[in-house]
Image: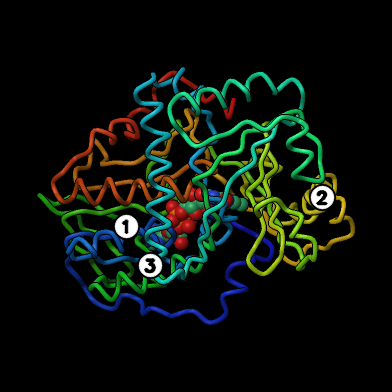
């Protein structure tokens, strides 16, 4: 599946990265991880740190999938509001989900700190503004819900927004506990760390099939066979080709990175910005003084990603940027891309062991908070493999796809 087209920012900025060998023999291991994106890297690092014997196979180069198209906004608030989560899943589970996401952002920040800040991860606040007067009441209700359950959020009225930003909006939630990230660098640092703890990592090694044999799973990669006690499928949106799920669907999304700009001192606390409209626009800054703008999600045609569409969508993204920040009028995009983007119908990721194939674990972090879900998945699956199965796995269970509760999206 073509996952992205255009010019990606993170790989271009990273320069030369470590190259891993391809698999050249039959191997046995405790845990085989399929996929070398953020999910696979987090799983490899967490499992290797826990003393498990891990092999990771990536069919292309490390971090060449959706993770390199990721714009690196790391937020505890989800595409589905807490109010909506409580309506759908009940108070206990809805609040637990949000608190798990808040803990996951902290966990990612700690991990990045342990890796010497390699992932360029910085704590950030987020502005979530009402795109129109019609959205104001729902947004205020969401603020009250977050506040009621002790989640870090404050309310900004029209005047308070105008005093901090060069745009006027009817109202906004201002959350703390979020972060920005360079996903490409974090993945490479996680792989280095996992390898130092004994994980074997192979690139250009596609897994082409797997089947059960007693307590083992046997996978094939080219001429070679891998025998594992557990297999973790961290194949990103291509997991749909292994386990098609009616609870998830794919769209296409667009993003760009501007040339460096000189007015970021007027960008309040370099916060992450997004809005209540659907599809939503989102923005952030970068350490090298650029702006990342993304959004404008569209339906994905059955033939897949429209490879040229990102060009015209970039122009719209630049117009939307200049509407918010008039100083950005005339600023050019230096990097722009279109990418496949996965979402689940009920707003939650799919994480867990396949009910029909014991020992086969899936990490499917659908939604705008994919990185946060990848972290949660790595932690829960590691614990389960170590013999401690968290009740949280029920919330994300693969089999829940028949649940009759479509996401009301953010509101
Ligand atoms: C435009 C865009 C912006 C986004 N912005 C954000 C954001 O701001 N914040 C956020 O949290 N999330 C964001 N996301 C979501 C995030 O990118 C994804 O959730 C995340 O990248 C998923 O990581 P992954 O490791 O599961 O998948 P991937 O990064 O796609 O990695 C999967 C890997 O598996 C490999 N693979 C597949 N099949 C096989 C096989 N058979 N054998 C071996 N290897 C295989 C692929 O080559 C790939 O490298 C964004 C996504 C897009 C598209």
- Residue 36 vs residue 256: left or right? left
- For label 2, the SS is loop
Residue bearing mark 2: 325
Image coords of residue 85 (percent x, y):
46, 25
Image coords of residue 365 (percent x, y):
44, 45
Foreground: disc 3 or disc 2: 2
The Cα–Cα distance between marks 3 and 2, rounded to whole angstroms, is: 36 Å
- In the rendered structure, which disc, 2 or 1, sits on the residue that comes first in sequence? 1
Image coords of residue 34 (percent x, y):
34, 59
Foreground: disc 2 or disc 1: 2
In the picture, which quadrant includes the C terminus?
top right
- For label 3, the SS is helix
Residue at image position (24%, 51%) is 382
Residue bearing mark 3: 190
Q: Determine contact: label 3, label 1, CB under 8 Å.
A: no
Q: Nearer the viewer, residue 313 or 105?
A: 105
Q: Nearer the viewer, residue 255 or 78?
A: 78
| Location of residue 281 with respect to 9 vertically, above or below | above
Q: Nearer the viewer, residue 114 or 385?
A: 114
Q: Determine contact: label 3, label 2, CB under 8 Å.
A: no
Residue bearing mark 1: 43
Mark 1 and ligand 1: say if the CB distance to the nearest ligand atom is below 8 Å. no
Residue 64 seen from this side: no
């Amino acid at each position: 599946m073509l996952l992205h087209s255009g010019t990606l920012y993170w790989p271009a900025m990273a320069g030369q990265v470590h190259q891993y060998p391809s698999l050249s023999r039959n191997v046995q291991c405790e845990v085989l991880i399929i996929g070398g994106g953020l999910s696979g890297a987090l799983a490899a690092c967490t499992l290797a740190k826990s003393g498990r014997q891990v092999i990771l196979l990536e069919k292309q180069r490390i971090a060449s999938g959706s993770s390199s198209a990721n714009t690196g906004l790391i937020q505890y608030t989800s595409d589905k509001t807490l109010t909506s989560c409580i309506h759908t899943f009940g108070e206990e589970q809805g609040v637990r989900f949000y608190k798990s996401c808040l803990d996951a952002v902290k966990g990612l920040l700690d991990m990045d700190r342990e890796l010497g800040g390699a992932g360029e991860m910085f704590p950030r606040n987020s502005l979530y503004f009402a795109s129109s007067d019609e959205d104001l009441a729902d947004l205020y209700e969401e603020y009250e819900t977050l506040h009621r359950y002790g989640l870090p959020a404050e309310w900004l009225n029209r005047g308070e927004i105008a005093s901090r930003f060069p745009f006027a909006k009817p109202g906004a939630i201002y959350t703390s506990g979020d972060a920005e990230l360079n996903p490409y660098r974090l993945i490479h640092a996680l792989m280095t760390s996992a390898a130092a703890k004994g994980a074997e990592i192979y690139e250009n090694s596609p897994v082409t099939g797997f089947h059960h044999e007693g307590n083992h799973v046997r996978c094939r990669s080219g001429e070679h066979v891998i025998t594992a006690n557990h297999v973790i499928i961290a194949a990103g949106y291509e997991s749909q080709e292994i386990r098609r799920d009616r609870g998830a669907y794919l769209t296409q999304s667009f993003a760009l990175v501007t040339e460096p700009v000189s007015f970021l001192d007027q960008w309040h606390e370099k916060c992450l910005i997004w809005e209540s409209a659907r599809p939503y626009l989102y923005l952030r800054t970068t350490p090298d003084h650029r702006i990342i703008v993304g959004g404008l999600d569209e339906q994905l045609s059955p033939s897949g990603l429209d490879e040229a569409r990102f060009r015209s969508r970039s122009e719209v993204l630049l117009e939307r940027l200049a509407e918010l920040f008039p100083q950005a009028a005339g600023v050019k995009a230096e990097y722009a891309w279109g990418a496949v983007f996965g979402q689940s119908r009920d707003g939650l990721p799919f994480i867990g062991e396949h009910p029909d194939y014991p020992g086969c674990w899936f990490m499917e972090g659908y939604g705008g908070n994919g990185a946060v879900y990848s972290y949660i998945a790595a932690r829960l699956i590691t614990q389960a493999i170590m013999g401690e199965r968290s009740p949280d796995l029920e919330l994300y269970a693969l089999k829940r796809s028949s649940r009759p509760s479509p996401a009301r999206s953010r509101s």
